[in-house]
Amino acid sequence: MKKFISTLVAAMLVAVIGINMASCSKTAEARLMVEVENFNKKDAGKPAGNGITMQKCELDEKGKMLIFNFTFIEPGVTVEELAPMMDEFKGAMVQGIAADKSGQELVNLLTEAGYGMEFNIKGRRTHKDVKATFSAEEVAKLAKK
């Protein structure tokens, strides 16, 4: 199951680091909005690999959260079976984001805007979902100054 989590994280990281930090002159929150819009136009609905499809990103401005919505085809493993492994998933995502320049740019922008991030994985077969959430404080710890 550990190898499965690794492949799941790898597929999701492809989508996460796809947010291109090109907008520089606006406030952090405005830049984040532009990046999410651009990402959704370019990459939403594309398969990320390993049965994962990045549906869309969205900003919860009230809750100050960047939400990544994925679907998972559940090939022999249901989303409900992933729930006990979400701490392991978060740890692997932390390592992946920390090791990637685009991932660092994203966490730096999220930190500047005071946002956290959430990964919502919904099973295509069961329609159940599981979430991994990083508070704004957790995201700030990932940022390399």
Image (cartoon, grey):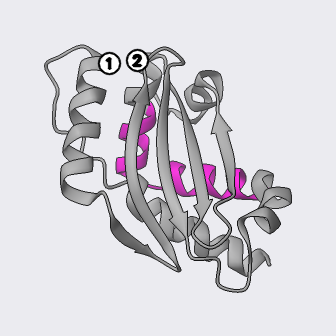
To which residue does mark 2 refer? 113
Given residues 87 and 121, the one toward you in this image is 121
Q: Quadrant of the N terminus?
A: bottom right
Whether residue 33 is situated above or below residue 36 in the rendered picture: above
Q: CA distance from mark 1 to mark 2?
A: 5 Å
Mark 1 nearby-residue class (10 Å; few <14, some 14–19, many ≥20): some
Q: What stretch of residues is rendered in magenta?
A: 88-107
Residue drawn at 23 percent across, 39 percent down: 37
Residue drawn at 41 percent across, 64 percent down: 14
Q: Amino acid at mark 1?
A: Glu
Q: How many marks?
A: 2
Residue drawn at 37 percent across, 50 percent down: 56
Indicate yes or no whether the magenta region holds residue 95.
yes
Q: Which mark is residue 16?
A: none
Main SS of the magenta segment?
helix
Whether residue 95 is situated above or below residue 59 in the rendered picture: below
Mark 1 and mark 2 in contact? Answer it, CB < 8 Å: yes
Give the quarter of the image for residue 29: top left
Indicate yes or no whether the magenta region holds residue 82.
no
For residue 60, side relative to residue 102 (left or right): right
Give the quarter of the image for residue 44: bottom left
Element under disc 2: helix
Whether residue 48 is situated above or below residue 130 in the rendered picture: below
Q: Amino acid at mark 2?
A: Ala
To which residue does mark 1 refer? 29
Counting from the top left corner in percent of width and height, residue 7 is at 60, 76
Counting from the top left corner in percent of width and height, residue 55 is at 40, 57
For residue 91, side relative to residue 19 (left or right): right
Counting from the top left corner in percent of width and height, residue 31 is at 24, 25
For residue 24, side relative to residue 106 (left or right): left
Given residues 62 and 25, the one toward you in this image is 62
